[in-house]
Image (cartoon, rainbow, N blue to C red):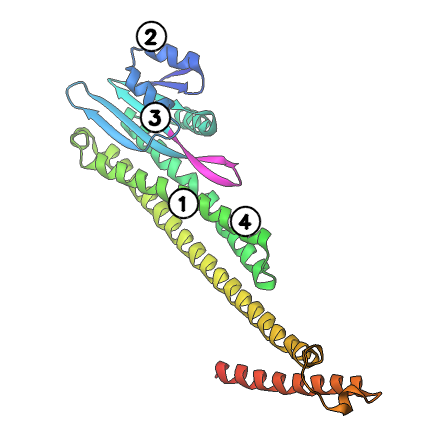
């Protein structure tokens, strides 16, 4: 639990994964249990609650988890609760890097108002996504070059992990944009000064840029996966076609030699001559080449 006193407000930073911090918020600061439940839920979606009479604001925002989980990136919620001139930030271990950025920001700007500081933090949270999205794009290009040389299961699975991570980022960025837009249309917006409004606009612009960038990356990756799926399907079709042709050609010797295993009259030249077996092989070979030529003509005709 951290407390930082500024000129215009007081900041509390609590770790939702630390039960002592939550107990302190509940008993010492009288924070409602419902808010603490929101903060402790790792699957909580972005949303906004504002009480004009009590002058309280609850804001839950999506933060990037910079550590990969199951080979892909995910997001975690961070909770901001404003009452009076107090700002309570409830984070998780996976988003603790935000705390260091908040502390550095306060160290450099001690005269920030509460809401301007909050909106700068929202701006920084969106900005933290961009290096990860850039790295995902670079990894996609690397895998694309490898798959052009040779389509393998390993690279395709890595491509799938990239797509999974982008799904989380796209969803989180959309929720963040909707939350800021909702905040601008709320009664709270009327109480902001010009500097706070400008900073909120900057946070919205950054969130929209992130959303558009993530959506573009996800769309490119989806098209890339679709292309390689088509390539694999075509390769499978070619393989099945080759196996079918080979099975047809392999039946010819069986058909020719099969006549010797049934009770039908055969020419004495084939049954009594010492070289009759060579004649049978020769007939099979000739019929094999004839059938191969017919199949080749049919395949060329289908390609046209």
* Percent x, y of residue 1: 43, 15
Q: Is residue 150 left or right of residue 36?
A: right
Q: Earlier in the sequence, mark 1 or mark 4?
A: 4
Mark 3 burial class by Cα count in 10 Å: few <14, some 14-19, many 20+: many
Q: Nearer the viewer, mark 2 or mark 1?
A: 1
- Indicate yes or no whether the magenta region holds residue 66: yes
Tell me what residue is drawn at x 37 percent, y 50 percent: 215
Distance of mark 1 from mark 4, alpha carbons? Answer: 14 Å
Asked if residue 56 can be seen in this view, the reply is yes
Distance of mark 2 from mark 1, alpha carbons? Answer: 39 Å
Distance of mark 2 from mark 4, alpha carbons? Answer: 47 Å
Asked if residue 87 can be seen in this view, the reply is no
* Percent x, y of residue 145: 57, 60
Tell me: residue 66, above or below residue 264: above
Front one among 290 and 279:
279
Q: Secondary structure at mark 3?
A: strand
Q: Mark 1 highlights which residue? A: 167
Q: Secondary structure at mark 1?
A: helix
Tell me what residue is drawn at x 68 percent, y 80 percent: 263
Q: Mark 3 highlights which residue? A: 79
Q: Secondary structure at mark 4?
A: helix
Front one among 105 and 218:
218
Q: Earlier in the sequence, mark 1 or mark 3?
A: 3
Quadrant of residue 296 in the image? Answer: bottom right
Q: Tell me the magenta residue range.
A: 64-77
Tell me what residue is drawn at x 29 percent, y 30 percent: 116
Mark 1 burial class by Cα count in 10 Å: few <14, some 14-19, many 20+: some
Q: Mark 4 highlights which residue? A: 158
Q: Mark 2 highlights which residue? A: 27
């Amino acid at each position: 639990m951290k407390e930082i006193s500024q000129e215009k407000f007081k900041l509390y930073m609590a770790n939702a994964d630390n039960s002592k911090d939550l107990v302190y918020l509940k008993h010492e600061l009288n924070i409602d249990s419902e808010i603490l439940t929101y903060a402790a839920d790792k699957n909580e979606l972005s949303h906004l609650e504002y009480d004009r009479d009590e002058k309280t604001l609850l804001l839950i925002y999506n933060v990037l988890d910079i550590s990969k989980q199951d080979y892909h990136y995910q997001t975690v919620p961070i909770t901001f609760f404003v009452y009076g001139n107090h700002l309570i930030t409830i984070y998780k271990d996976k988003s603790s890097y935000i705390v260091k950025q908040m502390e550095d920001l306060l160290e450099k700007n001690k005269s920030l108002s509460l809401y301007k500081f909050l909106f700068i933090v929202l701006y920084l949270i969106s900005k933290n996504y961009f290096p990860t999205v850039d790295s995902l794009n670079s990894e996609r290009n690397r895998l694309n070059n490898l798959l052009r040389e040779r389509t393998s299961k390993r690279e395709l699975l890595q491509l799938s992990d990239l797509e999974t991570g982008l799904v989380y980022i796209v969803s989180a960025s959309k929720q963040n944009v909707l939350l800021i837009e909702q905040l601008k249309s709320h009664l709270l917006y009327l109480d902001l000064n010009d500097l706070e409004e400008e900073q909120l606009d900057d946070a919205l612009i950054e969130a929209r840029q992130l959303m558009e960038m993530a959506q573009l990356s996800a769309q490119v990756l989806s098209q890339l996966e679709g292309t390689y799926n088509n390539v694999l399907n075509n390769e499978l079709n070619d393989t099945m076609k080759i196996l079918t042709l080979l099975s047809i050609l392999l039946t010819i010797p069986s058909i020719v030699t099969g006549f010797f295993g049934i009770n039908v009259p055969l020419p004495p030249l084939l049954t009594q001559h010492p070289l009759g077996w060579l004649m049978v092989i020769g007939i099979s070979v000739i019929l094999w080449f004839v059938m191969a030529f017919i199949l080749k003509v049919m395949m060329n005709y289908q390609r046209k």
